Amino acid sequence: MRKWFFACMAFSVCTILYGKDDPRLLKASRQDVAGWIHIHLEGSPGQIGYQHGFLLASEIDDALQMIRYAAKHNTHKDWNFYRDAAKKMFWPKVDREYQLEISGIVEGLKAKGKSYDVYDLAAYNGSIELLQYYVPMLMNKAKPGSANNKAPGNCSGFIATGSYTADGKIAIGHNNWSDYLAGERWNIIADIVPEKGSRMFMDMLPGFIHSGDDFVITGSGMLITETTITQFKGFDVNGIPEFVRARKAAQYARSIDDFVKIMTTGNNGGYANDWLVGDINTNEIARLELGLKHFRVWRTKDGIYVGSNFASDEKLIAEETTFNPADSTNSPNTRRKRWETLTAQYKGKIDAATGKIMEGDTYNELAKANEANRCVIAGRVDTDPKGCPEWDWPPFFPGGTVQGKVTTTALAKEMKFWAHMGNPSGEDFIAAPFFVQHPEYQWQAKYLHDMKAYPWTLFEAGK
């Protein structure tokens, strides 16, 4: 028995040492900076995947353990349910290129002693769609209306151009709202150089092949972000997974038309968003509001589009959501009102510096005061006694703004963006006192840690 133990230990060490000398890692790198993990991945799909899995093995393992635990608690379905769904519903529709990349991640994980398979990674990459669209669809089929408000309402963002920006070129900003379990782990900045398509510079969760909260600069000059359509209902099990379409659009879209075509082809309704897209080659920006049955595109070379989880198309709102656009007290509409004020205040001045200010804004237009709650752009729900009923977050739910990003045409041409880990308002989340005050969330203590607000930091692809 003892000989077997030491033989296994020796094998494990050899595997790790061999992995470090693996030629697939020669072009890959990792740096830990200001709360972020900045990685460079380059090569074939399999090579990119292997680099990803190897460099982020501990972080991917941690994230997968967390999502399995949270999924069971929140939906009462174990991980095998999600693996089976991903295997049957998602995997056959994943492009071969991305199947190879996911397989590479699995290989990289195994080289570091972490045992997962492609269906674990597919379910994880599609976890937003599965937990918050597919399962609610099943719930509503069993009992109509039982899953209302299950779709997320994440993020606050903008894209501007022409007379709205300081130099007449495009500026774009985004902050990520999510539950803190996921949010504290949304700290990867990936520079991906694939064999085919465009270079991508984006934030993401470890183990994702897409951004997930969708802030991307591409080598072809596309700027991409989004905010989620709140209280959305609908999902097509026969469609192409959103995570596949989002990655494909980032890698292969060379124009706004390309982006719209890729995102709408095979649309499954998963992770229904208002996509904010810019093309620095033409100085044009667009908003693609993508539901399941309906989508609409707005475009301009002189204007601004903002997002805070409200939809705008009347038909989409009426037929595909339970959202009340007339309710001035809900989170999406109060933040929308604040965006209108900030748009007027900063028109002609929007750049990276003002973008940071806007994404860290904490002014509540209803209360006429700076607050830490669901009604501000850099919101917090862990301090809100009302929670956020618009997407089924109860009082003091540990969720809200977890990070932010901003860039401009000038920076994007050099593949650079500013990023802020933690709430861009500068406020920290400290776990221990939170659990004392709110023991109802003690079930999260195993995986929820402090989330400090780091300074805005400039990141550059290749550096």
Image: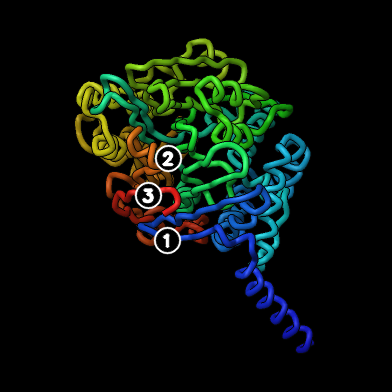
Measured from the top left, where is residue 345 in percent x and y?
A: 20, 25
Q: Nearer the viewer, mark 2 or mark 3?
A: 3
Q: Is residue 345 visible?
A: yes
Instruction: Out of 296 and 17, give the one closest to the viewer.
Output: 17
Left or right of 25, for residue 8: right
Measured from the top left, where is residue 179 in percent x and y?
A: 47, 45
Decide which of tag 1 and tag 2 comes sooner along the chain: 1
Which numbered circle lies on residue 459? 3
Q: Is residue 65 visible?
A: no
Measured from the top left, where is residue 264 in percent x and y?
A: 61, 22
At label 1, counting other C-alpha atoms closer than 10 Å, the crowd grade (few under 14, some 14-19, many 20 or more) is few
Q: Which image quarter holds the C terminus?
A: bottom left
Residue type for callout 1? Asp
Left or right of 433, for residue 56: right
Decide which of tag 2 and tag 3 comes sooner along the chain: 2
Q: Which residue is mark 2?
A: 177
Q: CA distance from mark 2 to mark 3?
A: 21 Å
Residue type for callout 2? Trp
Residue type for callout 3? Phe
Q: Nearer the viewer, mark 1 or mark 3?
A: 3
Left or right of 213, for residue 173: left
